[in-house]
Image: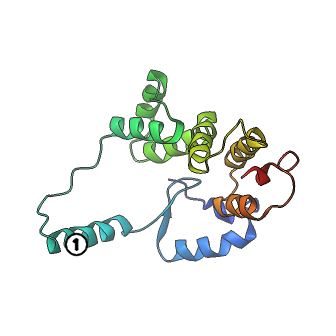
């Protein structure tokens, strides 16, 4: 776990620092440079879901948390679209057990496969066609937005509100 909250650094936008700082003061824990979890949040959600299941007659117990190797496989597939290499697994297993999941999340979010995988996801979601006018430029815009960590609300705002010609302004291709 990182003891220093990355959102208090000067490179983090000032507008985002205050809300996150308040969240941490209310009990969130900084697990990595990009993940904050409120203390007790998972157990509270688990209790709510368990009660809702009981109310609806569902008597199944929740399954156990996935083991470290299963977590690594699922995370790699979700974030990069591929299974982890043997070298990545060996390195992962060498990390301290308490830190390994958060470190792996950070690693895969920095992997070049992350932007490629999520560009393909958004291309499907937004119906981006590379053979349409401006489609290739729009796909490149989405890829660069993901690679540069552009907030999704900003990307959506630019896709919806930008004016111009699709040949000159990629966002107009949407």
Q: Which residue is mark 1?
A: 52
Most extreme residue toward the top is 86
Residue at the (76%, 62%) spot, across then down: 10
Q: Is residue 167 left or right of residue 24?
A: right
Instruction: Please say if 128 is above or below 61.
Output: above
Determine which quarter of the picture holds residue 130. top right
From the viewer's perspective, tell me whether residue 63 is left or right of residue 126. Answer: left
Residue 70 x, y percent position in the rendering: 34, 37
Which residue is painted at 40% across and 39% down in the image? 74
Q: Nearer the viewer, residue 27 or 37?
A: 37
Where is residue 142 drawn, in percent x and y? 70, 47
The colour scheme of the drawn protein is rainbow
Residue at 53% in and 71% down: 24
Which SS class for mark 1?
Answer: helix
Please identify the quarter of the rendering in which residue 48 is found.
bottom left
Q: Residues within 10 Å of mark 1 (few under 14, many from 20)?
A: few
* Total numbered badges shown on the rendered structure: 1
Q: Is residue 142 left or right of residue 70?
A: right
User: What is the x, y in percent for residue 159?
Assistant: 72, 58
- Residue at the extreme front of the image, as rendered: 132
- State the image coordinates of residue 88 (x, y, percent, origin top left): 48, 28
Question: Which residue is located at x 21 percent, y 68 percent?
Answer: 50
Front residue of this view, candidates 110 and 137:
137
Can you say whether 46 is above or below 127 in the image? below
The image shows residue 78, relative to residue 41, as above or below, that is: above
């Amino acid at each position: 776990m990182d003891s220093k909250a990355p959102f208090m650094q000067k490179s983090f936008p000032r507008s985002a620092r205050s809300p996150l700082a308040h969240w941490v003061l209310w009990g969130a824990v900084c697990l990595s440079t990009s993940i904050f979890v409120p203390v007790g949040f998972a157990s509270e959600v688990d209790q709510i879901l368990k009660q809702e299941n009981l109310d609806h007659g569902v008597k199944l117990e929740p399954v156990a948390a996935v083991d470290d190797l299963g977590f690594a496989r699922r995370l790699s597939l979700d974030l990069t679209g591929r299974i982890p290499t043997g070298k990545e697994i060996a390195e992962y297993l060498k990390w301290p057990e308490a830190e390994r999941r958060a470190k792996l999340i950070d690693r895969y979010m920095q992997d070049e496969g992350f932007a490629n995988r999520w560009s393909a996801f958004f291309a499907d979601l937004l119906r981006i066609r590379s053979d349409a006018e401006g489609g290739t430029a729009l796909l490149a815009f989405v890829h660069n937005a993901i690679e540069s960590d552009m907030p999704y609300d900003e990307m959506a705002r630019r896709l919806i509100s930008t004016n111009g010609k699709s040949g000159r302004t990629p966002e107009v291709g949407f």
